[in-house]
Image (cartoon, grey):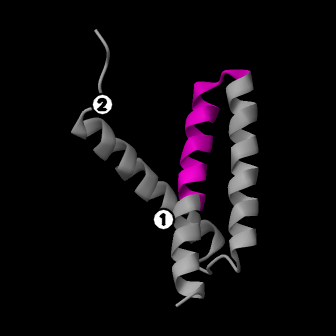
Amino acid sequence: MEKELIKADIMRALNEHKLKTYDRLEEKGKKPFNSSHESLGIITEEYHELTHAVESNDIVKIRKEIIDIGVACILSLASIDMNYT
């Protein structure tokens, strides 16, 4: 039988992501990314870190890098909205 995600799985992931986003803002400040180029650079760096984590087959590192990519995407989206309005 094929597994399916349920609402609780999605909510758990979203809550974890939200906490990590707030942690990142506390750690590095609340300034927006300066440009779409900066956003791309940060997301690309996180993607490369995910690639290395997958190659090492370390589930803890893989989870961390997936969350980091999500955080970078959310902050990029908020920054673009701020920079272009």
- By secondary structure, the bulk of the magenta-drawn segment is best described as helix
Q: Secondary structure at mark 1?
A: helix
Residue 13 versus residue 85 in the image, above or below: above
Q: Residue visible at 29% across and 46% down?
A: 11
Query: Gap in Å between the C-alphas at discs 2 and 1?
Result: 25 Å
Which of the labelled discs sits on residue 22, or is there none? 1
From the image, tell me which residue sits under label 2: 5
Q: Earlier in the sequence, mark 2 or mark 1?
A: 2
> Magenta residues?
56-72
Q: Nearer the viewer, mark 2 or mark 1?
A: 2
Residue at 24% x, 38% y: name it: 8
Q: Is 71 on the left or on the right of 39, as rendered?
A: left
Viewer-nearest residue: 44 or 63: 44
* Label 1 Cα neighbours within 10 Å, binned few <14 / some 14-19 / many ≥20: few
Q: Secondary structure at mark 2?
A: loop
Could you tell whether 35 is left or right of 24 in the image? Answer: right
The one of 73 and 61 positioned closer to us in this rendering: 73
**Residue pictured at 36% horizontal, 51% vertical:** 15
- Residue 84 lies in magenta, yes or no? no
Residue 37 in the image: state x and y as whole percent.
Answer: 75, 70
**Image quarter of the N terminus:** top left
Q: Position of residue 34 (x, y in %)?
A: 70, 80
Name the amino acid, label 2.
Leu
Say which amino acid is labelled 1: Tyr
Look at the picture and state if 19 lies above or below 34: above
Residue 66 within the magenta-colored segment of the rendering = yes
Name the spot of residue 17 as percent of width and height, x first: 45, 52
* Res. 3 mark: none
Tag 2–tag 1 contact (CB < 8 Å): no
Q: Which residue is depicted at the point 48% across and 65% down?
A: 22
